[in-house]
Image (cartoon, grey):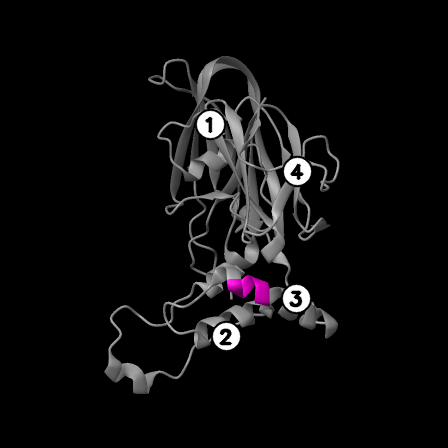
């Protein structure tokens, strides 16, 4: 099932638009693959299979044009109780909250949503766990400083999903504009760090990894002591830090002067494991408005790598300027 949510599976359409009646004899059904290389115990497999298999079955047996998401969810509540009675560890992720944190005109906007339209989202800003008496989420939360946002879903007065902990951190780069206004690069200044899962939608990546460049506008001259950027390594997927990172600054966006550079050897780049590092350089107290970052990718994974010959990829999560 990969990273598909229950809604993704439910919305799957196995019949193509160019379907013809004569193809009917060729239709055998639908299938889903469950890859277990990251499953360490049977409960992990159960968690990924259920209740997604129910969504797949719904797609297979429901006539075209008659799928009903709201009705399906109500039936899922009964089905999930049946799974629990059998001791099956099923995913309750349908009750969890998905967040999007976006820089907007010098502040951050925190948007929260849940696949279930029949739950309430309650949140806190003081570090306490949310309860039914906490603020009800009715729209984006505005953040202008280091802030802990906690949220959870509730139904009939009962907490349904896991508590979402969003630790938003603030530095001189947070919520500042990046030249070019590329949507993926906004993740670099949204104050939210990525997890050990590089597919968690908080890691910025590029289609071309041989040469990457971006520039941040601090909107005024600032004294710069330290530059750092979060970088993830996932050896099994060929995700590694780059060969080099060069930092340059400018006062007018026309003339740039180099400040410092990081270089890494193949041994340092292609380390095994899954981990996050902050790659940092001394900015030497430089005063400037614009900071340009130029990154050179590491190229192909070496012959003794688990993915020999594959282009290594770079994933950054946050720019930190102090």
- The part of the image, by quadrant, that contains residue 46 is bottom right
Q: Which mark is residue 57?
A: 2
Q: According to the image, label 3 marks what residue?
A: 90
Taken as a whole, is the magenta stretch helix, strand or loop? helix
Residue bearing the label numbered 4: 123
In the picture of the structure, the residue carrying the numbered disc 1 is: 104
Q: Which residues are magenta?
A: 71-75
Q: CA distance from mark 3 to mark 4?
A: 25 Å
Element at badge 2? helix
Q: Is residue 124 visible?
A: yes
Q: Earlier in the sequence, mark 1 or mark 4?
A: 1
Which residue corresponds to the image point at 45% horizontal and 71% vertical from the top-left?
Answer: 59
**Residue 74 magenta-highlighted:** yes
Q: Which mark is residue 150?
A: none
Task: Tell me which numbered mark, 3 or 4, is placed earlier along the sequence.
Answer: 3
Cα separation between marks 3 and 2: 16 Å
Q: Position of residue 25 (x, y in %)?
A: 31, 87
Q: Which secondary structure lies at badge 4? A: strand
Q: Residue at x 62, y 43 (%)?
A: 121
Q: Secondary structure at mark 3?
A: loop
């Amino acid at each position: 099932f990969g990273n598909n949510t229950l809604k993704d599976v439910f919305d799957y359409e196995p019949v193509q638009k160019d379907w013809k009646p004569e193809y009917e004899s060729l239709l055998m059904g639908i299938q889903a693959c469950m890859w277990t290389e990251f499953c360490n115990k049977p409960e992990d497999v159960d968690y990924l299979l259920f209740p997604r298999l129910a969504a797949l079955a719904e797609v297979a047996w429901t006539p075209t044009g008659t799928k009903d998401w709201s009705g399906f969810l109500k039936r899922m509540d009964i089905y999930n109780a049946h799974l629990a009675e059998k001791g099956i560890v099923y995913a309750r992720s349908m009750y969890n909250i998905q967040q999007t944190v976006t820089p907007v005109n010098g502040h951050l906007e925190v948007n929260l949503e849940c696949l279930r339209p029949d739950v309430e989202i309650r949140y806190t800003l003081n570090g306490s766990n949310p309860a039914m008496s906490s603020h009800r989420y009715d729209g984006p939360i505005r953040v202008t400083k280091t802030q802990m946002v906690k949220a959870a879903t509730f139904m009939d007065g009962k907490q349904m999903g896991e508590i979402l902990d969003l630790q938003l951190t603030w530095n001189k780069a947070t919520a500042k504009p990046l030249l070019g206004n590329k949507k993926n690069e906004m993740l670099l200044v949204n104050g939210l760090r990525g997890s050990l899962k590089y597919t968690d939608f908080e890691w910025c990546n590029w289609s071309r990894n041989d040469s990457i460049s971006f520039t941040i506008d601090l909107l005024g001259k600032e004294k710069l002591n330290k530059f750092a950027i979060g970088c993830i390594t996932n050896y099994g997927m060929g995700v590694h830090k780059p060969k080099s990172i060069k930092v340059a600054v400018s006062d007018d966006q026309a003339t740039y002067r180099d400040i410092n550079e990081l270089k890494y050897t193949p041994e340092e780049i292609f380390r095994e494991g899954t981990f996050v590092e902050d790659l940092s350089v001394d900015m030497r107290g430089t005063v400037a408005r614009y900071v340009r970052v130029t990154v050179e990718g590491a190229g192909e994974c070496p012959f003794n790598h688990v993915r020999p010959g594959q282009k290594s990829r770079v994933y950054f999560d946050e720019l930190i300027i102090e």
